[in-house]
Amino acid sequence: MVCHNDVCPDNVVFRDGRAAALIDFDLAAPGRALWDIAMTARYWVPMLDGEFPAALYPPGLDAAARLRILADSSGLSARDHAELPGVIEQATEVCRAFTARRVAGGDPGYLQASAERGGWERRDRMSTWLVNHRQTFTAALLN
């Protein structure tokens, strides 16, 4: 299957408050559905540390419950449900490495975005947060 690999709010066109189109397929590539769901979960659940979402998302979101809704609505198997938290952690590290390569190459868009979004400290917090909450997410996905 072909995965979009970047289903984030910036890549969705909204009309009257509803998603109308998915755009920006420059990262599309063959992959597993589980990978694309993990990439999507990072921003739509959101699977982010406690500090960053406060600026972009409404307060009080239940990440574990929202992750379960996403997984269930995506038709993932029970095995995929069990694997999803680890795949989200892996996807987060892959995204960090991708960004690091772009920053090291002097890509101005990535330099600016990294600085505006909390830089490497935020990414470190997010990775730690994901590991610390893995059991909570796994329990929500398997019950």
Image: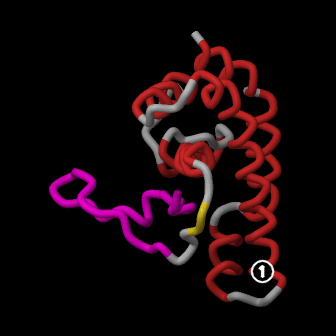
Q: Which is nearer the eye, 131 or 1?
A: 1
Q: Which sits in the foreground, 19 or 106? A: 19
Instruction: Specify the segment rendered in magenta.
Output: 1-25
Query: Which residue in the protein does label 1 denote?
Result: 103
For residue 2: magenta?
Answer: yes
Left or right: 135 in relation to 60: right
Q: Residue furthest front?
A: 1
x 62%, y 57%: residue: 31
Q: Estimate the x, y position of residue 71 in percent, counting from the top left.
A: 50, 31
Q: Residue at x 82, y 39 (%)?
A: 128
Image quarter of residue 100 = bottom right
Measured from the top left, where is residue 101 in percent x and y?
81, 77
Tell me where residue 72 appears, x and y as whole percent: 45, 27
Kind of residue at badge 1: Val
Return the x and y of residue 127 as percentages of the image width and height. Answer: 79, 45
Q: Tag 1, which secondary structure?
A: helix
